[in-house]
Amino acid sequence: MTKWSYVAGVLAAVTLQACAVEKKPPVVESGKAVVQAYVDAWNKHDSVAIDTLLTADAIHEDFAQNFRGEGRAEIVKFMRGHLAVEPDFKWQVTNSIEEGRYVALEWTWTATYTGPDPTGKPVTNRRISGRGASFAQLENRKIKRFSDYFDIASLFR
């Protein structure tokens, strides 16, 4: 009977372990969700969240402002520059599409701006708003490249 007790005990242990170790499929965050989290981090002025959403060698390009930041530190510095002249900016995604590791989005930007306008003339507390588009490339659910396209003069019309 000892042999049968041993076999029954092993079967019971294996059955319990199989029930307890139920593997759940990993939750794969969509590229749209990652990009929206990046926009949200900008809106919240959350540089820590930005660090977690970018690859170590990420690139953020803002063609209208002639900016190309390589790496998290340069991108966070760029965000802080916006905070200095547009402390209440709001970046809102209005439409987005995703295809594989790429996300394209349309957006609006509103802010109260203090600084030089596109002609170099100083302005103080001027409400600005405009529309633009961005293109993001993701790698392992992080942003590898983010490029903004918009007409900066249109923000001041």
Image (cartoon, rainbow, N blue to C red):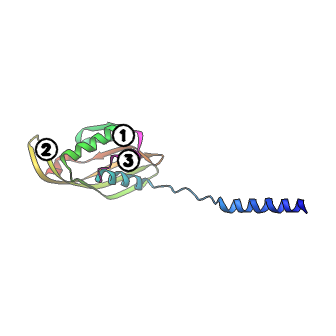
Compared to residue 56, the image places residue 2 above or below, namely below
**Quarter of image, res 19:** bottom right
* Sequence-earlier tag: 2 or 3: 2
Residue furthest right in the image: 1
Image height of 118 relative to 125, above or below: above
Identify the amino acid type marked 1. Arg
**Mark 3 Cα shell of 10 Å, populated few (<14), some (14-19), many (≥20):** many
Q: Is residue 131 magenta?
A: no
* Amino acid at the residue labelled 3: Ala
Q: Quadrant of the N terminus?
A: bottom right
Element type at mark 3: strand
Q: Secondary structure at mark 2?
A: strand
Where in the figure is residue 151, as x and y percent of width and height?
21, 47
| Residue linked to disc 1 | 72
Contact between labelled residues 1 and 2, with CB atoms less than 8 Å apart: no
Foreground mark, 2 or 3? 2
Q: Which residue is mark 2?
A: 115
Is any atom of residue 157 visible in this view?
Answer: no
State the separation of the CA atoms marked 2 and 3: 28 Å
Kindly identify which residue carries mark 3: 136
Which quadrant of the structure image shows residue 108? Answer: bottom left
Q: Residue 104: x, y in percent?
A: 36, 52
